[in-house]
Amino acid sequence: MTVSPGATLRELRERKPLIHQITNYVVMNETANATLALGALPVMAHAPEEVEEMVGLASALVLNIGTLSEHWIEAMLLAGRAASARGIPVVLDPVGAGATRYRTDTARRILDEVGVTDLRGNQGEIATLAGTEAEVRGVESMTTGLEPAALALGAARQLGLVASVTGPIDHVSDGERVLDVANGHPLLAAVTGTGCISSALTGCFLAVKPEEPLEAAAEALAALGVAAEDAAAGAGGPGTFHARLYDALAALDPDTLDGRARFSET
Amino acid sequence: MTVSPGATLRELRERKPLIHQITNYVVMNETANATLALGALPVMAHAPEEVEEMVGLASALVLNIGTLSEHWIEAMLLAGRAASARGIPVVLDPVGAGATRYRTDTARRILDEVGVTDLRGNQGEIATLAGTEAEVRGVESMTTGLEPAALALGAARQLGLVASVTGPIDHVSDGERVLDVANGHPLLAAVTGTGCISSALTGCFLAVKPEEPLEAAAEALAALGVAAEDAAAGAGGPGTFHARLYDALAALDPDTLDGRARFSET
Amino acid sequence: MTVSPGATLRELRERKPLIHQITNYVVMNETANATLALGALPVMAHAPEEVEEMVGLASALVLNIGTLSEHWIEAMLLAGRAASARGIPVVLDPVGAGATRYRTDTARRILDEVGVTDLRGNQGEIATLAGTEAEVRGVESMTTGLEPAALALGAARQLGLVASVTGPIDHVSDGERVLDVANGHPLLAAVTGTGCISSALTGCFLAVKPEEPLEAAAEALAALGVAAEDAAAGAGGPGTFHARLYDALAALDPDTLDGRARFSET
């Protein structure tokens, strides 16, 4: 196990990889700022006319279905196929899969037509896509029939990718191993888009360490979790926590990050 | 008069109603975060393919015409009719009605085709839709020919809904009574989207208390006003006020809220 | 040289000009809030059905191509032509020109079909549009073949407009003179959309002083730079800096602004 969020973060800040994000209207500013605060460069582009060219400049692609419509799906598929062809990592955030058929079908279609490297979602979303029973209300996960670690393992195995099931404890699996990440803070759940931020940061870490996607995905969640712990200290609630989260991402110290990350293997 | 924002807020935090919002690009993050900070669950979805299904999961629908285009109007009408059919409350925020014909016509069309429960706007917007003389510049209300309390009463009566005319003092009417809400802070006018936030929170309160829409609408405005008072204390200007507003919404105390709300009946 | 950001700001706060912005999804909230904090009124509208009417109410138009698609280009051209016909200033922010052909071509098309008053971009974007060699990655400028002051001068001359090349030092030229603005703070580069904010504020200043576009454009950048200096003092990183930037814009003092602005002429 070569998990070292500090080493990956150090390399990320040197390389400043470009992360192409086709994401939802609600969180675009937030995922761009988180990407920038971490030390990578975000770019948002969704026109079918340009997504393939933009993917050609990027080191990772993040697809997020939070506010879908037909043109955006077309762009995600074009960009995703171009990313697969170039061999750069693709993260899929299936926001609200399980809540409506449109979202479930779109997420499945992307999984079918694009070589997704990492699927990052809550329990309900991942369970829906793995064919497990789940209840999703809007974009919130309610209940699932499985323990999240088993869910991550099963989804990774069945879908042939790395599955990142986030929650109070995150579980990341490549279908063989499951890494647990116990960093974070309850205020993350009080701000919209922190799940989407975790997907964007997963893209950042994968861009630097594409050959070890399991480790990179777990490292990204640890980095966000540690930043959230720092941001929560002194925050007066979700609004100031949100502003401080970018401060904390920018202030993440590669030298102490490994020691603060709380990884375990199930 | 059974106005008790504290009791409604307590119930909202227990039930966590899902509030479906089809709103403008400028404020999506803001209204989602305000909904979440208050204690409800936001979901944004605007594709014609899914809005009816999403409405089926929601306890209230909020329509906001701040950045219109054709596909979005179609989605608002589909979602609005589905909400009316299900009998859940619908809030309409007619951003910029009176500024362009497109906005005025769209707001009127929604009022015609959807059973709108509450119309929340500034004086110029409400006056435009009630057929009263008004001057609107962009999305700002300039002047209207009527006192706002009389405007709320007349609009409610004419349109057959609850009218919430917000400003330094808010006036909410069901066409028979007018409740005034004297909470709030001038900094609310220095941040874009606080009007849209008041519409989203109106949807939250209506979701919990749909049978008393006049009271629920006034309670929502009192809750936002009290939170704004708290957020302003210690804020250095509109930016830190904005961040602190979510802190204050999350910290609203149901036990003291009724005592702090400044209601009166005209 | 009648450069006085303080005098222009004072007049702006009295007139409260309406600034119509057709901008990208990532920064809409940010540019609206910056416009409002400065003291002007923002309005976002992009439907072809209403942009000409909205332009008719506005004192300046800001076009930003950060998240393009076909309908938006159509709207920008309609709005831009209407603004030219009315004789109000138009600012173009060519986000990502040079990164993809679609962006470069769209920026060129707007320059061809609209009477652009001020072109505000980073070195790579302006160099691309001026026909100079440049490397742009995503929306970031990497390298250009020219010194930025010479670039501003050449672009202004060639394109027949005011060119604002922003960076650690900003260079603004009308093709005859070059004004340098040495205000600002490195944290501006750590927050997405601060370039877009500088374009929006350029629109605000041009609205008040349309007959002196070179001076107005330089004044806008000085105002933002001074606000950034204030916001950075006491900020804990990019997130709190971002919130404090709106505080600082709202707190800008017309009486001291001229003394704090660091202008020079190349």
Image (cartoon, coloured by chain):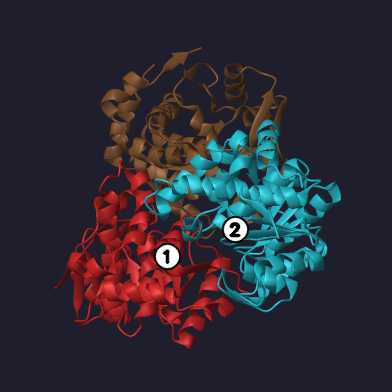
Chain colours: A cyan, B red, C brown
Left or right, B172 with respect to A34, comes to: left
Q: Nearer the viewer, residue B265 or A34?
A: A34
Left or right, A199 with respect to B25, comes to: right
Q: Nearer the viewer, mark 1 or mark 2?
A: 1
Residue drawn 55% across and 32% down? C119
Secondary structure type for disc 2: loop
Q: Position of residue C251 (x, y in %)?
A: 30, 35
Secondary structure type for disc 1: helix
Q: Nearer the viewer, residue A90 or C100?
A: A90
Residue C56 position (above or below residue B118):
above
Left or right, A125 with respect to B196, comes to: right
Circle 2 Cα neighbour tier, 10 Å, few/some/many (<14 / 14–19 / ≥20) = many
Task: Tell me how far mark 1 sits from mark 2, CA to CA.
Answer: 18 Å
Q: Given the image, what chain letter belongs to the residue carrying mark 1? A: B
Residue A45 seen in this snapshot:
no
At label 2, which amino acid type do we have?
Answer: Asn
Q: Nearer the viewer, residue C27 or A176?
A: A176
Numbered tag placed on residue B35 in the rendering:
1
Q: Given the image, what chain letter belongs to the residue carrying mark 2? A: A
Residue C122 seen in this snapshot:
yes
Q: Quadrant of residue C149?
A: top right
At label 1, which amino acid type do we have?
Answer: Thr
Residue drawn 37% across and 44% down? B239
Residue drawn 58% across and 62% down? A167
Residue drawn 41% across and 42% down? C243
Mark 2 lies on residue = A24
Q: Quadrant of residue A249?
A: top right
Q: Position of residue B54 (x, y in %)?
A: 56, 76
Circle 1 Cα neighbour tier, 10 Å, few/some/many (<14 / 14–19 / ≥20) = many
Residue C56 position (above or below residue C266):
below
Numbered tag placed on residue B128 in the rendering:
none
